[in-house]
Each structure stands twice: as structure tokens, then as C-alpha cells.
Image (cartoon, coloured by chain):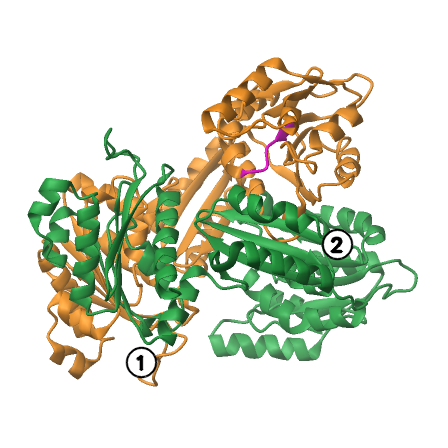
Chain colours: A orange, B green
Amino acid sequence: MRTVVLNTGTELLLGDVQEAHLAFIACEIFPLGLRVNEQRTVPDSALIGTALMELFPRAEILFVTGGLGPTSDDITRDIVAGLLGLHLQQDAAVLALLKRRLKTRGIKWVSSIARQADVPAGAQILPNKSGSAPGLYLRSNINPAVISPHLFLLPGPPRELQPMFRDSVMSILRSIVPSRSIERRIYKIACVGESIVEEAIGAKVLAIPGVELGYCARPGEVDVRTVGAADPVVRADKVIRGELGLSIFSTGDETLEEVLVKLLARRKETIALAESCTGGLLAHRLTNVPGSSEVFLADCVVYANQAKIDLLDLDPKLIEQHGAVSERVARAMAEGARTKARSTYALSTTGIAGPSGGSPEKPVGTVYIGLAAPDETVVKSLFFPSDRETFKQLVAQAAFELLRRKLIG
Amino acid sequence: MRTVVLNTGTELLLGDVQEAHLAFIACEIFPLGLRVNEQRTVPDSALIGTALMELFPRAEILFVTGGLGPTSDDITRDIVAGLLGLHLQQDAAVLALLKRRLKTRGIKWVSSIARQADVPAGAQILPNKSGSAPGLYLRSNINPAVISPHLFLLPGPPRELQPMFRDSVMSILRSIVPSRSIERRIYKIACVGESIVEEAIGAKVLAIPGVELGYCARPGEVDVRTVGAADPVVRADKVIRGELGLSIFSTGDETLEEVLVKLLARRKETIALAESCTGGLLAHRLTNVPGSSEVFLADCVVYANQAKIDLLDLDPKLIEQHGAVSERVARAMAEGARTKARSTYALSTTGIAGPSGGSPEKPVGTVYIGLAAPDETVVKSLFFPSDRETFKQLVAQAAFELLRRKLIG
């Protein structure tokens, strides 16, 4: 079924807000065999009506986001009712809910709020558990005199749209989309270049008829995706697992740090960190994982040389003789953090993030990553010449992957 | 001049990649008095041609992104040449550049790469310093037999498009857009609710004719934006500065952490951190700022109680008597970090990020933020019931704002 997303919102076209609905909706509807065929953004103006008139005949399912709130620029509801020749009726249940919501939050009632309870005749209300304006579903050709697609009017803020989509929209979609067996698999790989991954699996997977193969690359990570009917996707699965094996850290939604927290928790082991060039990013990523407090003990972010000495008991001579960015200092940092925090493992990072601080022998991008474990300490030397934030992400991926490889043996 | 952005790319409609060009282009062209009037995304297919035919008559400036690379799904160049009745000619200079680029990177030449040197007759080449495919500019009605807008074909990856836009596209735009005096101002405010900001300035600013007022809210921050002719924008500026005063931490592109690094560097002072519930986020944000190594010394991310004792010399009785999430522990952490790192200031955070770990007396969202300074230590108690990552951001904003207020007196 032809599916279209229409985003309304002047703030999106001014660049004040980054559009986030398209990627979310596309991922949600994919398991139903639906794809977004086209997407548009229009301002909060009569152009919403122009776009809808163009899209009605070419869409079978149309998601419209934004413009359902109480203010004067929230006009989606009125425009849709007008185009479809439907009267707006105040819905008593929605009105009561709005009044209750405001009361519990101690917000004063103003008459414009009531506009959110206006519902086109025959529309189904989609409850909004994270905001005030409800969503609306208008079935295909709801007014027999007007050709129209299945129409979903959804709120603009992602924190309102996303739960509404999962709680209400998906079940309606399941009832209107003919069921179709489509499989989608994902394979996440850290610290291997996209071209190397493609060389390993590309030709072999594409030789299987009926499989679509896609890649999504971000700093230090490649996600391989396959799409198709069950049988060819399973055949591709064998090829991909055969070629990439232990390089695959997840075949689901998990991040690399989530995988690490799970692996450590299962083994009842703990981790500490000593970060220099990553400046807290490793700890930030680990502590984004709920339950990380079970396995993550401490991080010494030792940006200054004196801090390396004071907090990790580093021998000052090591820094004098080898420099702060060196194999020896990375080793001592990891071992120092492991001793201080009494953890099973410790990771350390020391490098030159740039833009300044480089030298001919140690240019911007130089980095040493240490891993102290009960049986040994290893240090990896890498080179990531790039901008500051990408450098930090690349080093974090490399450090986490070093630990993951150790944990899986 | 009516301006339209057309994004091409199946990966955008599958949700594999988050669209990022619209917001970037919108912000760049705003000072020229241009706004994006409409935006569309279409897959890598003949639909690119359908969309272009619809958009040619309604756009005066049209930015097309993606589909300029070497692979079989890169078809933008061919479709545009076809629609405009222009022959594609291999450009010798572009070809030589492509060959040189591959040679220095040690990549093997394959014949498909040469497609990127095909240029529609009369098009201007926009150099790509971050990738291989050049951009193309085709002036309005380049073929007098076909009505067409000023057409910019730009590469899909943001790291290629963005420098090309600033280096080449902007100067062409300046030559074709009639100059118009439009002002845009921004006022960034941390840790004040959007509704409170609106109450303070909304009615007064909107009473000035010719000013548009906008807000952009994110966790712990509100950006106020004004747009209009110079005179009313200056009048609004007086109102906004008068009402919000020291709450405004920046009137430019600066982040709160950039402001802090600048303030500290100017005063030749230093900062250390002791993070529990923010888990390294404060350090990560500070170390994203180039030059932060001048002012940021160290961070003890003390997630486990034992780490608080071992790394910050905390008296274990404090934790026993008051709990790790308490005013007393926040104070001792800040003072401990300041002593250990020998810094001018130290910030500490201890709280309950959730989803687990809450209790009736100390529910999820409870947090204490400490600031140790040469003259005094202060602790702020706050409550941010929200998801884990938002909680961390809100606490980071509050901690940074606490320090900023101290620094500006």
C-alpha cells in the first residue's frame, strides 16, 4: 500500500527543529511490509491543504504530523475536516480529559485549549498519554463523496507521537494492511570498515535471489541489513554469519555498550575506566544503559598529566620518558584504574583528539587503548585522524570492542 | 524567492539514515532572506523525475541532495540532464581529480567511478573537498526551451554537502538573491522553563510590529529567536535583554560548556568534577570543546559507593548516615574532587537516574549538585523525574549553569 508522510511545521523549514518522524515511522511500519514511498514538509499554512489535495489520490495510507495543538498556527484538524467535508464536533470525553490533565498539573484553563477536543465527524480518537492533543484516525473514503486515503493525524512532538504510534496506530494498520511475510535482519559490526564488510559478504548475499542488502555506517560501526521473504533471508543469514562470525556484536537493537553491560552482568564481573582523550565518553555511554551500576564501578577522567599521577598513582617518570600519549602510559592507566577501583577489568584511553596538540611523531589522531584483565594487560595502538567528536566516538568503539573480544574469548 | 529542498535516497525513507540537510540548509540561507518553502524526500528511482517535474514550475531555487555517487542507484545527474535536454559530457578536470584522489588513498580504479565526472552541458562544477562526487549548479532556464529554477545538485553525505554549501553554494546564492536586510537574533537560556520565558517576554515582544518570535526548547535549555527588519529586532533585543538579563548565557552558536571553557580560560582558572548520576556526561561535554584541556583537569566518575570512598577520600560514615544521594555526600564529593585535582572549582552530582533505585523518600529524579569554590561550597537540591538520558542532560545543564552563575558573579 502506497504510504506517505506529511510533516507540517514552520519550525522544521526554518531549521529550528530537526525532523525525527520519518525514520521512526519507517522503522515501525517495516515489519508490516510497508515502506514510506514519499515524504514532504510544509509550513503551518494553507499549503497543508494544497499538499493534502495532491497526496490524497496518490497515497493509500497518509500520516500527517503536527498542527493539532491549541495555538493559532495549529490548523491541521480544520484543514482536513474542510477538505473531507466533515463537521467538527466537540468530544465530551476528550474535553473532560483535557480539563483533568490541566488541573493535576496546576495549569490555568484558557478557552483555546478546548480546540483540541474538536473532532471531525466519524474520526477515531487516538489517546495521547504524553501530551494534551489526541491523534485522529479517519478511515479511507470516510466521506463517500471524497476520495481519501487512510488518514492518521498525529501530534508533532516525538515524545507524544511515538507512544501513540506504538499503542494505537500499529493495531489499526494491522487491520487494514494485508498480511505479508517479510523478514528484516540486522547485523551490527564494530571497528571493521564498510568496504571490508561489503567485500566479505556483498557478492555472496546478492547472489541469493530475493534478498535486498543494505548498509548503514556510523563512526566505528557498520549495520548490515537484509530484507526479503523468509527463505532467502535465512539463506543470507547463513552466509553473513559464516563470513562475519564473532565480528557481529548484535543482531538486534542493542548498542555495543548494552552488549558489554549484559556480558559483564552475566559473568558477575566489573569494569573501571581511566580516560584521557575520550574525556568521559566511555563512562557516559556505559551509564546510559539501565542497570550499568551493577557492573560499572568508576572512571578516572585524567585530562591533566598531574591528574594521571594524583588519581592513578602513575609514576611521573613514565610521562617524562614516554609522553602522556604512549603505550606505557596507557598500560599504567589501565592497571592503575583496575587496582584503584578493585574491578575485574579496566579500559584506558590516551591520545590526541586535536585540533591542536599534534606533533610530527605523534600527529592528531594518535591513540593508545589499554585493557587490564586478571590474566594480562594489552595495549592497542591506533590512528584515527578526524574531527574531535568523531575521534572520541571511534576510540570509544575500539575500546569497547577490545573488551568485548576479551569477554567472548 | 521560492526555495525547495528535494532529498533523494531510499535509505532515508527506510529509516536507515536520519535526514540532516533540511535544518542545515534552512539555517545557512536564512541570513540571505531565504526560507525553505517546501521539502520532499523521494527514493532513488524514477520518482526523482516526477518530483522534479512537479517542483520546477513552483520553485525559483531548488536544492537536490544525493544520488551523485558512482553506484547504480546514483541517478540524479542523468535524470536532471534528461529533463533539461542537456547532454552529459565527461569533464577532464574532474576526471583527473578523481584519479588523483583514489591514487593517494590507494583505492583501485573501477570504470563506474568515471560516471562522477559526467557533467550536463553548461553546468558549473562545485568542488567537493570531502568526497569524490562534485556538486553541480545549473542556472535558471539553462536550456531556454525548458522552464527550470536555479538548480543545485549536492552530495548526500552531510560531511560533503556542508563544506560545499559554505564554500561554493552561498556565493552563488548571494549573486542571484536580491539583497534584503533581515535580522535574526538568538538568546540561549539554561534551566528556565519555556513557559516562564514566554511569560516574561512573549506579550512585550509581540507588541512590537514586524518581529517574529520563536522558541526552541530542549532538555534544560530554551533558545529564543527573533526575526524581522533591523529596527524592530533591535527594539525586541532591548526588551529581551531587559527581562532575561543574566539568564542569557549566549547570543550566538555557543553551547553552555563552550561558554564555561571560555570564562574559565579568561580567568586562568580550572575545573574538576566528581560525577555519580551523570556518569561522565559533564566531562564528555566539556571535553568536546577544543581547548578544554587548558581548564579541565580531572573527573572522578564514582558510580559505586566504594569508589566514592577510594577515589575521593569520602568518609564512609557519610554514606552510611545520609545515603549516597544526599546533600552531605554531594558536598564532600565536590570538595574531595577540588582537593584531589587541585582545581579552582569542582562540580559534583549524585542522584537517582532510574528506572530502578528510587524509594518513597528519594524517588527517581532526586539529585544533589555540589559546587566547591575557593570561598564556599554550595549544594543545590533538584528533582527531575524523567527518562535516564533526559535526566542526565537536565542535571548537566543545572550543574553547568550553577558554575556559570558563580563565574559571572
Which kind of residue does numbered mark 2 sit on?
Gly
Residue that carries the numbered disc 1 in the rendered image:
A362
Q: Name the quadrant of the C terminus of chain B.
A: bottom left
Residue at horizontal 47 percent and vertical 32 percent from the top = A231
Residue at horizontal 62 percent and vertical 53 percent from the top = A15
x and y, in percent, of residue B349 in the image: 27, 51
Q: Could you classify mark 2 by the number of other residues whose Cα lies within 10 Å: few (under 14), some (14-19), or many (20 or more)?
A: some
In this rendering, the answer to whether A179 lies above or below A328 is: above
Residue that carries the numbered disc 2 in the rendered image:
B210
Which kind of residue does numbered mark 1 sit on?
Lys
Residue at horizontal 66 percent and vertical 35 percent from the top = A71
- Is residue B18 in sight in this rendering? yes
Gap in angstroms between the C-alphas marked 1 and 2: 55 Å
Q: Residue furthest bottom?
A: A360
x and y, in percent, of residue B376 in the image: 23, 61
Residue at horizontal 75 percent and vertical 34 percent from the top = A52
